[in-house]
Image (cartoon, rainbow, N blue to C red):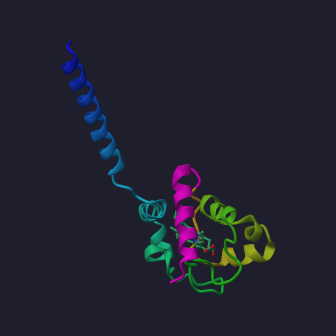
Amino acid sequence: MGRTQRALAVVAILLALAAVAVRWWRRPQIGRVQRGWTVASRKGCFTCHGPGGIRGMADPGHGLDEIPPFAGGLITMYARSEGEIREWILDGGARRISGTKAGKFFLERQPIKMPAYRGHLKSEEVDRLVDYINWLRQHPY
Ligand code: HEC
């Protein structure tokens, strides 16, 4: 191979690498929060918590009358921390509440209950749901 040929080969390789880099850089980017919305939509969260999780459907019996929106419960009863959000999603309730007599009393009286999603979500999906819920909490509507 002559000098020129070698130089051309190097240029060709560099161009090919640059093309790959540009494609990688321009690939569609879906943010964590947006992905959380998609997971919530696919897993049926919005059927109970309302479109986008911003207004829950009626749920008489516990005195609050509605399923809480993702952006935070109506009272201090609902998820307070990221750990508790995970508990609600995976176990259908937080021990702080369901573990007490008063909590149980109210939770058992309502007809619609938060399902436990453990085993029905991948850990990445739970992470994105938490990202979405946290985002909603930081952006009150
Ligand atoms: C069958 C209806 C139903 C579905 C589906 C549902 N939830 Fe719930 N969720 C509830 C109810 C009801 C409560 C309120 C707790 C209670 O009163 O038992 C609740 C409470 C919560 C809470 C704690 C309340 C708060 O605002 O802090 C979170 C977080 C939550 N749900 C997230 C989710 C996510 C994420 C999904 C989807 C993976 C989902 N829920 C699907 C009914 C539902």
State whether residue 121 appears in this view: no
Q: Is residue 132 magenta?
A: yes
Residue 39 left/right relative to 28: right
Displayed quadrant of residue 104: bottom right
The magenta stretch is: 118-141
Ligand 1: image quarter: bottom right
Q: Please, which residue is most extreme toward the front here?
A: 3
Residue 44, percent from left and from top: 45, 65
Quadrant containing the N terminus is top left
Residue 18 or 127: which is nearer the viewer?
Answer: 18
Q: Please, which residue is most extreme toward the top here?
A: 1
Residue 93 left/right relative to 55: right
| Residue occupying the point 41% across, 61% down | 42
Residue 100 or 140: which is nearer the viewer?
Answer: 140
Q: Is residue 66 above or below residue 132?
A: below
Residue 26 left/right relative to 93: left
Q: Is residue 60 magenta?
A: no
Displayed quadrant of residue 65: bottom right
| Residue occupying the point 48% across, 64% down | 33
| Residue occupying the point 32% across, 51% down | 26
State whether residue 118 appears in this view: yes
Residue 38, percent from left and from top: 42, 62
Q: Is residue 6 above or below residue 64?
A: above
**Main secondary-structure element of the magenta-colored stretch:** helix
Residue 23 left/right relative to 36: left
All told, the count of numbered labels is 0
Q: Please, which residue is most extreme toward the right here?
A: 101
Residue 68 or 61: which is nearer the viewer?
Answer: 68
| Residue occupying the point 19% across, 19% down | 5
Residue 52, percent from left and from top: 45, 74
